[in-house]
Amino acid sequence: MRAGRFELIYRDDVWGELERRGATVAMVPFSDRAGHGGTVGTITLSRVDGGELVEVERWSGRDELAYALEAAVWDRFGQFNGHPRIRGTVTWLLADRVVLIGGERGDVPFEEVVR
């Protein structure tokens, strides 16, 4: 199977799209709990400029990049079945090509590296 036009299948494609948009960081807020299926908030693309994070683009619409960026949520938590309330952020860091998930699961903080 091959990716269709505008379809981002591989993580390398996501990194390339972030570069194309001038972003070095993408943040995807999410939350929910068992029985509710999960929600993703407004996605923010930013870049580091002079040691500060500068917003490049924000959107809550659905396009292939949004689906690819939020995939880490669904890969990690599925439909949130069996989980207490979870709130967090998936952070894509272009410089290190690493994806982090961090937040609170119930009242317990967590942070994980996703490869």
Image (cartoon, helix red, strand yellow):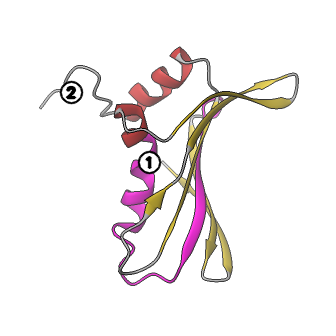
Q: Name the residue under label 1.
A: 70
Residue 40 versus residue 35 in the image, above or below? above
Q: Residue furthest left?
A: 1
Q: In which quarter of the image is residue 73?
A: bottom left
Within-10-Å neighbours for mark 1: few <14, some 14–19, many 20+: many
Disc 1 marks a residue whose amino acid type is Glu
Nearer to us of marks 1 and 2 is 1
Disc 2 marks a residue whose amino acid type is Ala
In the displayed structure image, the side of residue 51 where residue 88 appears, left or right:
left
Q: Which residue is drawn at 60% across and 62% down?
A: 88
Q: Position of residue 31 (x, y in %)?
A: 52, 66
Q: Which residue is drawn at 44% across and 30% down?
A: 14
Magenta stretch encompasses residue 72: yes
Q: Position of residue 76 (x, y in %)?
A: 42, 63
Q: Residue at x 37, y 42 (%)?
A: 67
- Mark 2 secondary-structure assignment: loop
Q: Which residue is drawn at 38% across and 59% down?
A: 74
- Provide the residue span drawn in magenta: 69-96
Image quadrant containing the N terminus: top left
Task: Please count the marks in the image.
Answer: 2
Circles 1 and 2, Cβ within 8 Å, touching? The answer is no
In the displayed structure image, the side of residue 12 where residue 55 appears, left or right:
right
In the displayed structure image, the side of residue 38 where residue 48 appears, left or right:
right
Q: Mark 2 points at which residue?
A: 3
